[in-house]
Amino acid sequence: MSNINLTPDEIEYFSRKVRLKILHEDDDVVLMTAPNEDQLMDIIRELICEKPMNLREIHTILSGIASEDKIRKALITLVENGLAVLGDDGRYSAVPEY
């Protein structure tokens, strides 16, 4: 599997872009709901629209939100539905919607 080619700043930037419903927030803890399958596909598609990424990079950004298996399943579904493509370099890119 390819290495992670994201800088720490990029990881933080993309992590902040992921928006989930907040159930509780205080000074110490933020409790959010986990995304369902459709929401996860939308989140991943938004990420790869901005920058092509491999599975490991996506998992790094979504760690604590979704397992690698769920991310892999979402990516396969996106590819099967023609919403993403897997490049020769192992990176997923979003297919533009018309």
Image: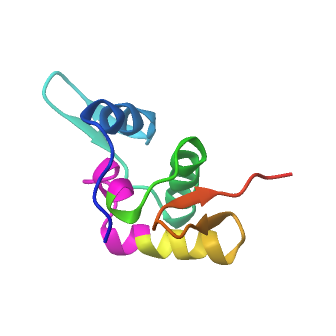
Characterize the magenta stretch by its predominant secondary structure: helix
**Residue 58 part of the magenta-drawn span:** yes
Residue sitting farthest toward the front = 88
Measured from the top left, where is residue 42 in percent x and y? 58, 54
| Image: 33 above or below 79 | above
Residue sitting farthest toward the top = 27
Direction from residue 41 to residue 59 in the image, left or right: left
Residue sitting farthest toward the left = 28
Q: Pick whichever, 88 or 58, lies toward us.
A: 88
What residue span does the magenta drawing correspond to?
57-71
Direction from residue 47 to residue 96 in the image, left or right: right
Measured from the top left, where is residue 48 in percent x and y? 54, 51
Q: Pick whichever, 2 or 47, lies toward us.
A: 2
| Image: 23 above or below 98 | above
The colour scheme of the drawn protein is: rainbow
* Location of the N terminus (image quadrant): bottom left
Quadrant of residue 95 within the rendered picture: bottom right
Total count of labels: 0
Query: Residue at image x 29%, y 37%?
Result: 7
Query: Residue at image x 45%, y 68%?
Result: 90
Quadrant of residue 2 within the rendered picture: bottom left
**Residue 54 part of the magenta-drawn span:** no
Measured from the top left, where is residue 35 in percent x and y? 44, 56
Query: Residue at image x 25%, y 35%?
Result: 8
Q: Pick whichever, 93 or 73, lies toward us.
A: 93
Query: Residue at image x 30%, y 67%?
Result: 67
Direction from residue 34 to residue 36 in the image, left or right: right
| Image: 78 above or below 10 | below
| Image: 43 above or below 68 | above
Direction from residue 91 to residue 30 in the image, left or right: left
Measured from the top left, where is residue 80 in percent x and y? 66, 78
